[in-house]
């Protein structure tokens, strides 16, 4: 198998996510540990449950507005403004192509405007999509929107919303949580595979199986050769095909992993009360470094403590299973 050329990818990471290259061992261990913890706890399948609780767009908007008013009226007002913008595009999954089915918020520098794309199901799950993207809308074009914590407040508000409305459909509530876990596990897997290749390239100047196995073993991880070769071929293919690049773009994938870990720590430490989240979000989004952000969230030491992160993960899965068994 020919050697994988990572030079252009490394230049890309230096520009958009230098933290990863500066703390590559930590990022690898964090992603690999999280992936293995999900596998050990059998959170490895994507839930295909679709709720029968049909809800039209107006009702979903009302659910979100009622919830946001309990946190801060200004957020409820901003949510209404978001939906009224001419560059807020709403489609329903039965009307759009598969590759147009994502919901996202972006800043368009050419048009100097925010664009909101919402793909909805016309059921009870739409409220979760609306509120998740609303938090991105609140934080777009700030330091937070281009940070490894860009997903943190969206995760946080989404989980608060799910907890608040779980009685609408408990099966849906559990399915949404499992889907979130599954997606984080996939992101962790992508990151750990790419980071291992980067570590080998950094240390040995190549990405051979023997060198990658040596690095994995030094962190007490095993490395199956067949899996390694398959993963390496996939990464090489995606790096060489622009339309597939997003599948191995760790600048995006690690946002999810890091934000999820931060969410676990904040939830475990109970340092962010629902009533003051608006003020905390404002301070965090204005901070211009990852270190300043995690300090504001009061997890600046814990975010580096892998054993503590694992203990928080165990509590999260224990709570999930307890609710699932009811």
Image: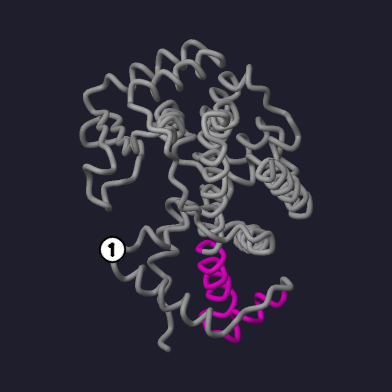
**Most distant residue in the bottom direction:** 1
Query: Residue 51 location, x and y as percent?
Result: 44, 40
Q: Nearer the viewer, residue 251 or 155?
A: 155
Which quarter of the picture shows residue 235?
A: bottom left
The residue drawn where x is 57% and y is 24% is 283
Q: Position of residue 277 (x, y in %)?
A: 60, 22
Residue drawn 31% across the image and 71% down it: 240
For the point 54% across and 54% down, the residue is 182
| In the displayed structure image, the side of residue 9 where residue 173 appears, left or right | right
The answer to whether 12 appears left or right of 214 in the picture is left
Is 172 situated left or right of 119 in this image? right
- Residue 290 location, quadrant: top right
User: Residue 34 or 109: which is nearer the viewer?
Assistant: 34
Q: Which residue is mark 1?
A: 242
Q: Quadrant of the C terminus?
A: top right
What percent of the width, then of the height, locates residue 55?
38, 29
Q: Is residue 98 above or below residue 155?
A: below
Helix, strand or loop under label 1: helix
Residue found at the far top of this picture: 73
Magenta segment:
190-218
């Amino acid at each position: 198998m020919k050697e994988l050329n990572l030079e252009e990818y490394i230049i890309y990471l230096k520009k958009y996510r230098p933290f990863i290259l500066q703390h590559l061992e930590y990022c690898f261990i964090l992603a690999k540990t999280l992936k293995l913890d999900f596998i050990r706890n059998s959170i490895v399948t994507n839930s295909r449950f679709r709720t029968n609780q049909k809800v039209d767009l107006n009702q979903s908007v009302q659910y979100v507005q009622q919830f946001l008013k309990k946190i801060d009226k200004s957020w409820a007002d901003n949510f209404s403004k978001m939906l009224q913008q001419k560059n807020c595009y709403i489609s329903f999954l039965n009307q759009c192509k598969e590759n147009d089915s994502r919901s996202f918020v972006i800043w368009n520098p050419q048009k100097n405007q925010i664009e909101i794309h919402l793909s909805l199901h016309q059921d009870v799950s739409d409220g979760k999509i609306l509120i998740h993207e609303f938090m991105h809308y609140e934080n777009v074009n700030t330091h937070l929107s281009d940070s490894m914590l860009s997903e943190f407040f969206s995760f946080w508000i989404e989980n608060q919303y799910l907890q608040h409305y779980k009685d609408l459909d408990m099966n849906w509530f559990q399915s949404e949580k499992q889907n979130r876990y599954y997606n984080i596990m996939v992101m962790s897997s992508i990151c750990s595979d790419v980071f291992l290749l980067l570590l080998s390239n950094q240390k040995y100047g190549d990405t051979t199986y023997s060198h990658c196995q040596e690095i994995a073993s030094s962190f007490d991880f095993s490395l199956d050769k067949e899996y390694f070769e398959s993963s390496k071929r996939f990464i090489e293919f995606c790096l060489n095909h622009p339309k597939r690049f997003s599948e191995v773009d760790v600048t995006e994938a690690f946002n999810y992993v890091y934000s999820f870990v931060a969410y676990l720590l904040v939830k475990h430490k109970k340092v962010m009360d629902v009533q003051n989240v608006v003020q905390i979000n404002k301070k965090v989004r204005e901070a211009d470094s990852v270190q300043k952000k995690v300090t504001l969230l009061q997890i600046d030491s814990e975010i580096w403590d892998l054993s503590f992160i694992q203990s928080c993960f165990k509590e999260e899965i224990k709570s999930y299973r307890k609710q699932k068994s009811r």
